Amino acid sequence: MVICVYTEERWDDILAAVDSVRTQSLPAQETLLVVDHNTRLLRRLKDHYGDCDDGADADVGAEADADAGAGQRVRVVANVGPRGLSSGRNTGIAGSCGEVIAFLDDDAVAERDWLRHFAAAYADPRVLAVGGRTVPVWASRRRPVWFPEEFDWVVGCSYRGLPPGRVRVRNVLGGNASFRREAFDAAGGFASGIGRDGDKRPLGCEETELCIRLARARPDALLLIDDRAVIHHKVPAARERFGYFRSRTYAEGLSKALVTRSVGAQAGLETERRYTTRVLPAGIARGLRDALLGRAGGAGRAGAIVAGVAAAAGGYLVGAARARRGGPRFTVAAVPDLSAPDLSAPDPSAPDPSAPDPSAPSAHARADDGPARSRHESTHESRHESTSRREGAA
């Protein structure tokens, strides 16, 4: 179980995320907190949870003691790669010990059966990734009346248009996802140079690119979402504003252009075609109908959908033009070998980003990936939930 963290400003959120993992009905083997180049946060978390890498941890004793401490062990490690969410996740993959690795955003809390629903899906050996349903928790305590549910992916949440149940998808969303370890053996780790790796814009699509790469490496693989695996994701006030909505949809277009440059438009835009030709027109129609009936926000929602499509299309065209001129590329990273370095120790030569350079914007205020890309292919739902501890979520 991996949670990537980067700022002390989310201290309470981090503790809440960890607590939600520790109280799962199906315990994780451990929770790995990967701290992204923030020495002060690393030390503070190690002080809070204790240093579990000294060999004296109670969970590492007899097997009976391990059962007693199931789900309670927390390890705090430093990101050994470049600054960014992708490198943090790759560090977590390498440092974890389970055969299934789950990821949770640092500003989200999981419902009690979250990991149990993930584990049940892995009873089918063809399943290499499982995502869940992410519910927004608005800072204002209610959805902005103009904000269309069809665009909840803008704030990292499940959007209107996804089919219910456990269904096959093109890609999962990284803040509420799990992967079988062999998925990374087959396809490599998360790519750097895509998503929030230092760009000022809220870019995304790192999960999309990984999942497309995985499907190519393993054509027989199943990637699923299960809407019973629920987390609740905080949406800060700044992301409730139309300016962020417009910026994020534009950035999604830029990211999609980068992905399609690598994988081709057929794979890179496969699900977006259905989304833009079916889901969004239906959303516009609902908004206009609500406006005619005098319901609050109807016209605003319809207008926001049109604006979001226009911004994403504009970003895609700009990104495609940059690509033709030899613009930025991303690099598929191998999962690092962590057998040598001490993951828990901060690099004394690295600057402490507790006082960040304002000219180097944060790479981790994680961009929320685009639509979750359902293929509308329902899969057989196994009822077997008796996964072994070895196949539990790390």
Image (tube, helix red, strand yellow):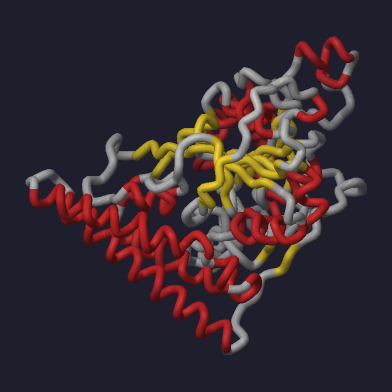
**285 left or right, relative to 108:** left
Residue visible at 63% across and 40% down? 130
Where in the figure is residue 43, as x and y percent of width and height? 69, 38
Identify the image quadrant of residue 389.
top right
Q: Position of residue 56 (x, y in %)?
A: 87, 22
Which residue appears at 76% of the width and 47% of the height? 346
Horizontal relation, residue 64 to residue 275: left or right? right
Q: Position of residue 150 (x, y in %)?
A: 35, 51
- The reply to whether residue 105 is in sight is no
23 or 58: nearer the viewer: 23
Q: Residue at x 40, y 48 (%)?
A: 161
Q: Nearer the viewer, residue 225 or 351?
A: 225
* Residue 74 in view in this figure: yes
Q: Outermost residue toward the bottom?
A: 325
Give the tally of numbered discs: 0
Residue 167 lies in what quarter of the image?
top right
